[in-house]
Image (cartoon, helix red, strand yellow):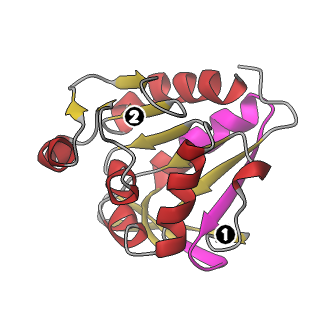
Amino acid sequence: MAGLTGKKVAFLVANEGVEQVELTDPWQAVEAAGGTPVLIAPDTGDVQAFKHLDRGDVFDASVASADARVDEYAGLVLPGGVANPDQLRTDAPAVALTKAFLEAGKPVAAICHGPWTLIEAGVVVGRELTSWPSLRTDIENAGAAWVDQPVKVCNCGPGVLVTSRNPDDLPGFNQAIIEAFAD
């Protein structure tokens, strides 16, 4: 993969609860494409990842969500994990940052439970998304159409929205985000 040379990509997570593979796999894809991933969280410092219900590795968030600026990044990735987006949607700066990316016409990618943050930001109305199946009702109640497919790329609004269901879909998700962020 190539196409992100000189571009930074924001990865927005809570300080605890992100599904590790949904952070590390897209992160590595961005690096392989020549991009620079940047970890953003409500607080700088430790981010405790999880491997499903077990504690995983600890990562370092270098930027607080309140200090992140959309114009510095080519796009935004919202990894999943149940606890991660549930916490992010209660962090006003994280929600505002998510909304600002799409309002600026920048691509945003969310996997698994990641669309909860999109719903909280009010940016899914009239769009098509996929996600972990349990979010279907939430997505539909927020005014979007839910589809059951590995990757959904939605161009029907400001900013491309790339969504995916779960870690099994990461190869297609990674390809789609690199294409979206390279444009």
Which of the 4 image quadrants contains residue 169? top left
Magenta stretch encompasses residue 32: yes
Q: Secondary structure at mark 2?
A: strand
Q: Secondary structure at mark 1?
A: strand
Q: Which residue is mark 1?
A: 61
Relative to residue 41, is residue 18 drawn left or right?
A: left
Return the residue nearer the eye: 55 or 84: 84
Is residue 15 visible in the rendered structure shown here? no
Residue occupying image coordinates x 32% and y 53%:
119
Is residue 78 visible in the rendered structure shown here? yes
- Tell me if residue 111 comes above or below residue 89 in the rendering: above
Residue type of the residue flagged with mark 2: Thr
Residue 40 image offset from top left, x and y in percent: 63, 64
Residue 163's disc number: 2
| Magenta part of the chain | 25-47
Residue occupying image coordinates x 17% and y 50%:
138
Residue 136's disc number: none
Residue 23 image offset from top left, x and y in percent: 53, 50
Relative to residue 57, is residue 152 drawn left or right?
A: left
| Distance Cα–Cα, label 2 vs label 1 | 23 Å
- Tell me if residue 89 comes above or below residue 132 in the rendering: below
Near mark 2 (Cα within 10 A), the count class, few <14, some 14-19 or many ≥20, is: many
Relative to residue 143, is residue 50 drawn left or right?
A: right
Magenta stretch encompasses residue 107: no
Residue occupying image coordinates x 39% and y 65%:
84
Residue occupying image coordinates x 34% and y 67%:
54
Return the residue nearer the eye: 175 or 123: 123
In the rendered image, the residue lying farthest to the left is: 137
In the rendered image, the residue lying farthest to the right is: 6
